[in-house]
Amino acid sequence: MNNDHRSRLRVLHLRPPSLTDRPPGHLFAAVGQQRSGGAAAERGRCRFRVLRLAAALVVLAGAGDPAAAEGNPRRGERAFQRCFACHSVDPAETARLEGPSLYGVVGRPAAAVAGYAYSEALRARAAAGLVWDGPAIARYIADPQGEIPGTRMTSPPMGDAQERADIVAYLASAGRR
């Protein structure tokens, strides 16, 4: 047998390396050792950067406060107390308040309460397709004037992400009564 034939046979008997019996930094070290120039090396470095970025995003996504991902309606009801000066969540509410009724607001198109005089800015966003889902409500109450400049809502920005998630959870539960 010639040497060329033996090397082919040797390749057939190789098995892929197990990642579980390697130290945690093994892949990063192996990729980091790729020092040769050329297009193949550059592609390898690019792939490594993409993998490193993806790994960082996965870690960051899991690093957040688990409670912030889901609001608590009871805490939201307490936080919503300051909103009752202008808004109601009672479907039978007939008093004229400064703001529109928020009963059933989660999932509703913006500027959809009949008889309420919405600002031109909010009507324009509604015409563009704004729907009050959880993230849209959270962004809006975080900074009403920053999210929709020209809106009539004058409450100060709500900086606490957990409090916003709680209010959204409360509004969602209040709309199912």
Image (cartoon, grey):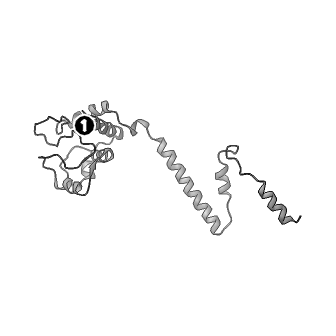
Would you say 41 lies left or right of 140 here?
right
Would you say 169 lies left or right of 20 here?
left
| Residue at the (26%, 52%) spot, across then down | 130
Disc 1: which residue: 175
Quadrant placement of the N terminus = bottom right
**Element under disc 1:** loop
| Residue at the (23%, 55%) spot, across then down | 125
Q: Residues within 10 Å of mark 1 (few under 14, many from 20)?
A: some
User: Percent position (x, y) of residue 158?
Assistant: 29, 42
User: Percent position (x, y) of residue 150?
Assistant: 20, 54
| Residue at the (25%, 58%) spot, across then down | 128
Residue at the right extreme, as displayed: 1
Q: Nearer the viewer, residue 38 or 116?
A: 116
| Residue at the (56%, 57%) spot, across then down | 49
User: Percent position (x, y) of residue 170?
Assistant: 29, 35
Residue at the bottom extreme, as displayed: 38
In the figure, residue 46 lies in which quadrant? Answer: bottom right
In the figure, residue 97 lies in which quadrant? Answer: top left
Quadrant placement of the C terminus = top left
User: Percent position (x, y) of residue 24?
Assistant: 65, 45
Placement of 173 over or under 138, stated as above or below: above
In the figure, residue 91 lies in which quadrant? Answer: top left
Q: How many numbered discs, if any?
A: 1
Kind of residue sitting beneath label 1: Gly
Placement of 158 over or under 125, stated as above or below: above
